[in-house]
Image (tube, rainbow, N blue to C red):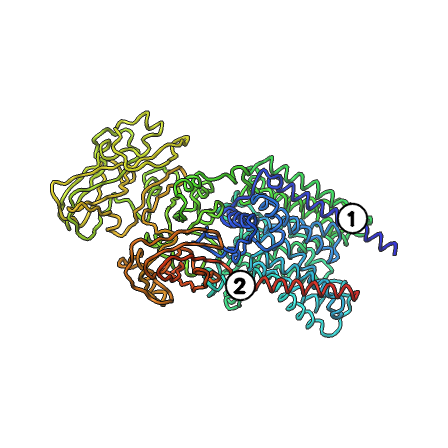
Amino acid sequence: MAHRLMRAVRDQRMGWLAAGLVGVVVLALFFPAASGRGVFSFGDILSLHYPERAAYERALAAGELPLWSPDVMAGYPLLAEGQFSPLYPPSYLLHLLLPTELALNGFVILHFAWAGVGMYLLARGLKLSHAASVLSALTYMLGGFCVAHLNHLNIVAIAAWLPAFYLAARTAALRLRGGWRGAFRPLAATVACWAAILLIGHPQMAMLSLLIVAAGMVAQAVAPEDDAALEHPRRSGAAARTIAALAVVALLGAAQAAAQLLPTWELTRLSQRAGGLDPDFFASFSLHPAYLLLLFSPFPLGDPYPAISVEVVGYVGIVPLMLAAVAILGGRRRGALFWGAMALVSLLLALGRWNPLYILLLRVPVLNWFRVPARYLYGFGFAMAVLSGLGYDALAQRARASLRADAATLWPWAAAAAGSVAAVAGARALGAEGMYAVWRWLPLGLAVGGALAVGWLWRGCRPATAWLGACAALVTLDLLAFAATFGFSYNATEPREAFVAEPRVAAFLAADAGEEPYRVYTYEEIVPVPPVMRESLYPNLSMLHGINALGGNLPLTLTRYAEYMAEPTPRKLDLLNVRYLLIPQVLPVDEASEFYDLEDPFAPTLVGRHVTFAGLRVRSVVVESYVSHSVDLADGVVAAEVVLLDRDAERARLPLRIGLDTAEWAYPRSDVRANIRHSRPGIARAWPARSGFPPENHEGYVYRAEYALAEAVSVTALEVLPRELPRAYIRVERVILIDENGEPHLLAHLIGEGDHTLAYRSEDVAIYRNNDALPRAYLVHRARPLAERPALLAALADPAYDLRSEVLLAEGDGLDVVAPAGDEVQVTLYESSRVELRARSEAEGYLVLADAYYPGWEATVDGQPVPIREANGYVRAVRLAAGEHEVVFRYRPASFRWGAAVSLAAVALLLVGAWRVRRSGV
């Protein structure tokens, strides 16, 4: 009894020491983030997780959950998307207590530590020594899968839970060998782990975790991997009990997470994923056989970005590979064969398209929803971590005669601690290029050192404790060097001040837009560098600042949105209240890049184009334009000519002269003002700008020139021809044709393009103001039902459709009444999940709210419920009688309410079960 008590105390002490070592390693590796000086910012963190978590934190500060966000895709069920883990308790606590960027850091660090501690506990549960368990923990925590996927926060979080999930399930399977008695506690722990994994919000990784655990439970019930099964002799029906328990775990865990799962299921059914994936997309990011070389040398090209995707990195270390081979080939535990089979099957599945049998998974429900076969490296990394520990103990057992009782434990711990400090400090001293250079030879050095240590131990040579310590030190040095080197690439941190800095564009929009709701749309022709992404409010980043946007890039894209935006047009932007178009800037180094920087795809420059339209009798012409790269040009130089045509006959030729009709756009900038050789003509518009080197704030100008014709001429076409300046350096923003009655006709409208005018320009973004944008809410008095979606989208694209006076309905009654004068609509409250409006009209009509149509939105008119109709292919409308009305839209998704009820019931059921078990003493 005393011996068992002493052993338990020693095990507990060693367990705390292991947890402390894991914490030291994690803090040393991620010190910039742990100290708060840096923030993880690469890839999905900046473009997905940080924006979603910022919206989450704002909602928590307001005392609510982020059920809906108006800041992406004209409205989106954000909680249903779930990748920011909104209902996962650690996520909730971190964001309740810390600013978003620190909560994000904490989420990463917490789960890396939990991955290590969990694997240590699993290895101890598998009867590995303390030293071998630490080695398994480091191999899993610092191996390629977790480290490479750091910017996929929820993937790392789920990976962190897998060891604990597996341990709880394994313990339950052992207890179930002898019957149901005594199995409640491990089964309850298994359910809790499964519910946590589901709440983290990555369905693919959750399913892979369940598959791994299910395989382990069944194998443990049928053929246990070690002598622990002797404590639980097998009785008949063990396999059936295990399968039944597995089903109960899956269902009860899913029930506990129902508040997340039901909204996600609803969104999935309405998303592009609903019909499964096409074969090419399904097999995208397969592990090409050539990438197997990364298992031996993870940085063959130096910086892995962007040539090597994080999805194909499965590095687990050189020495762990050797130890895994020892476990499989020379170990005495049959469990090694199970783990070896898991590693092999996972590797074969990761090959994806390069495995001819992989395509069969397209026929497997649920699994056919997910792409990226390389993520099966998850199972490979998990199995290799266990195998490395098994191999380490196998070597220790071969040399047992030469070991003292605790030497195999104490030496490797010291070696691991010293190795972690040396690896991280050395990596930081060498820097990125230095570490990439080191990795050209480091795999060879590790292979030689590992082969010597493993070979020496295999032969049972002395001093065994030193060689075991050498193995541990080599593993730690290897994996810390790998993880630290990744920290110069995909896992780099950004100074906190720069990361959280408010973009200048946010201040501009706040000042320019006024009080009325508006949307922005960012043109995605390029994927710019992060500073440009921030300033251009690249899709999803609008959520950081509470700015409503039409664009968005989320894994579950609504089918209706994808169809609507498959061919974006100026009219579609108008319908969705897009008042600003943002174009990310590239560094202009030639005419092509200069031209691209300012090219508005919905209102292209007229320079170099020939456009036709319905005939007009034109008496005068107004041209609004500006030029660049013109400082050295004198007054009178003809930059371009505007040619008026009637069919093919030329009617007039209007010169755009430098200094008289147009001029340098950055005229007030200090360097331009000091050297410019031409005058400044009349200004049509001035707007805030930032340019030059170094950049300075100044105004930008668009200039106005008016040409009176000798007599009215018939015009059916127009072209703008560049003359003394290249096309890229001339911008004709507007042409207004004034007919013989004095009525102005905007050329952009005549040719079916948008009236967009430059409103802001910096080195990072150009912003065009859409002068045609409809308000967020408005009244129409004509409605046309079109139940067939292709017909509705075709009607929407028809130039004859008057979007300002008619609405197209997917269902509901048509309407055609004379529009009265004086319609009024006022948005009195606009919140994420509630919109209040006041509308007044002298005639019956439809109130159109240009927010996304989605299940769960309810509407009342003067307190009475009314149906919401899908309008114009994507937005909402309600029918109003003549008069003044108070209209309220509220988002109350039944999927969340039912899910929350199921979750509470499942948690209550588990608590009642725990109470009964405790009372019965089982």
Q: Are marks 2 and 1 in contact (CB under 8 Å)?
A: no
Foreground pick, 51 / 739: 739
Q: Work out whether residue 71 or residue 306 is closer to the camera in this orientation and state it.
A: 71
Is label 2 in a helix, a strand or a loop? Answer: helix
As drawn, 40 above or below 327: above
Q: Is residue 676 left or right of residue 370?
A: left
Q: Residue at x 68, y 64 (%)?
A: 910
Which mark is first along the chain, 1 or 2? 1
The kind of residue on which mark 2 rests is Ser
Task: State left or right for residue 527 relative to residue 55.
Answer: left
**Image height of 558 relative to 577, above or below:** below
Label 1 is placed on what type of residue?
Arg
The answer for how far apart the CA atoms under marks 2 and 1 are is 47 Å
* Nearer the camera: disc 2 or disc 1: 2
Q: Is residue 211 visible?
A: no
Does residue 734 sit above or below 164 in this rendering? Answer: above
**What residue did someone put label 1 on?**
13
Q: Quadrant of residue 817?
A: bottom left
Q: Residues within 10 Å of mark 1 (few under 14, many from 20)?
A: few
Image coordinates for residue 433, horizontal then vertical, percent = 54, 38
Residue 102: give its label.
none
> Residue 317, relative to residue 281: is it above or below?
above
Using residue 563 as the reference point, say whether residue 479 is left or right of it.
Answer: right
Q: Is residue 582 visible?
A: yes
- The residue indicated by pointer 2 is 895
The local secondary structure at tag 1 comes to helix
Quadrant where the image shows the C terminus? bottom right
Which quadrant of the rendered structure holds the N terminus? bottom right
Could you say where residue 919 lies in the image, as x and y percent from the top left? 78, 65
